[in-house]
Amino acid sequence: MKKLLIVCFALGICAIAVSLTAYSKVFNETYKLKADSTLSKAACAVCHLSPKGGKLNPYGLDIQVKMKEAKTKKITKEILAKVEVLDSDKDGVKNIDEIKKGTFPGVK
C-alpha cells in the first residue's frame, strides 16, 4: 500500500511539472522568446511569485480569470492575447509592452 501511494504521489508531481512546462512553452512560443532571455529562463516566475510555482502574481491571476471565463484549464495564445492589454502589476505599462521589453508583467 505504501509503495502504491508513493508511486501515485510521484506521478502526480510529474503531471504537474509537465503541465507547467506546457504553460511556459505556450508563453515562449507566443512571444517568440529566445531560450536565453530573462522571461524564458524565468519559466514559472512569469506567472507565479516563485520560480518554483505556488501562488500566482497579478499577471498569473489575470490569466487565471481569463481561463475561467473561457472555461478551460489550458493556456492558449488567445488567453494570453486577452491579458496583453491589461496592466496586471499596475505600474502604468501594459502587459504586452513589458513582455516586449523583456520585463515581468506581474511584478512592479
Image (cartoon, rainbow, N blue to C red):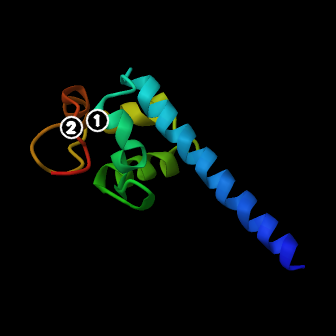
Residue type marked 1: Thr
Viewer-side residue, 2 vs 12: 2
- Nearest the viewer among 45 and 35 is 35
Q: Residue shown at 62%/54% (left/top)? A: 16
Q: Position of residue 45 (x, y in %)?
A: 36, 50
Per the model, the C-alpha gap separating discs 1 and 2 is 8 Å
Pinpoint residue 65: horizontal percent, then vertical percent.
42, 52
Residue at 30% x, 29% y: name it: 37
User: Which marked residue is nearer to the observer: mark 1 or mark 2?
Assistant: 1
Residue that lies at the very extreme toward the left in this rendered image: 92
Label 1: which residue? 38
- Horizontally, residue 60 falls left or right of residue 8, namely left
| Residue at 24% in and 42% down | 104
Residue 25, image x, y percentages: 51, 32
Q: Do the residues labelled 1 and 2 touch (CB within 8 Å)?
A: yes
Q: What is the residue that sits farthest to the bottom in this orientation?
A: 1
What's the residue at 70%, 60% (across, down)?
12
Looking at the image, residue 61 lies above or below residue 95: below
Which kind of residue does numbered mark 2 sit on? Thr
Q: Mark 2 = which residue?
A: 103
For the question of whether residue 47 can be seen, the reply is yes
**Residue 87 as seen in the image, left or right of residue 69:** left
Disc 2 element? loop
Between discs 1 and 2, the one toward the N terminus: 1
